[in-house]
Image (tube, helix red, strand yellow):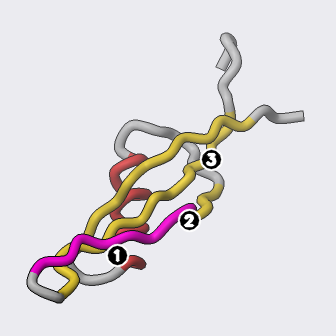
Amino acid sequence: MTAVKIIKVLGTSSESWEDAAHEAVREASRTVDNITGVEIQDHTAKVEDGSITEYKATVEVAFPVRGENQ
């Protein structure tokens, strides 16, 4: 049985929520090895003058827990 650790990462984009989710995974993968899955938890946005200026996606990133011998 493999234990899995889950962390939350907030990604942002000026283009879309999908791009924000991709950004969260890209950034997490810089310091986390072997990401095995993600779950999008929340979509939010920053609004200025009646328009969305920044999309935000809260992403749960899952990866296996490494033992001392790994």
Q: Please tell me which of labels 3 and 2 falls first in the chain.
A: 2
Residue 55 is inside the magenta segment: no
Please provide the residue range marked out in magenta: 40-48
Q: Which residue is mark 3?
A: 62
Q: Is residue 51 above or below residue 67?
A: below
| Left or right of residue 1, residue 32 in this image | left
Residue at x 18% of width, y 88% of height: 51
For the C terminus, give its image quadrant.
top right
Tell me the residue at 39%/57% (across/down). Answer: 24
Q: Camera-side residue: 46 or 3?
A: 46
Mostly what secondary structure, the magenta segment?
Answer: strand
Label 3 close to label 1 by CB (< 8 Å): no
Label 2: element kind? strand
In the picture, measured across the screen, residue 1 lies left or right of residue 58, that is right
Q: Which residue is mark 1?
A: 19
Residue 32 x/y as whole percent:
47, 39
Q: Using the numbered discs, state the Cα–Cα distance from disc 3 to disc 1 in whole angstroms.
A: 19 Å
Secondary structure beneath dot 1 equals helix
Residue 40 — which label? 2
Residue at the bottom extreme? 50
Q: Residue at x 38, y 54 (%)?
A: 10
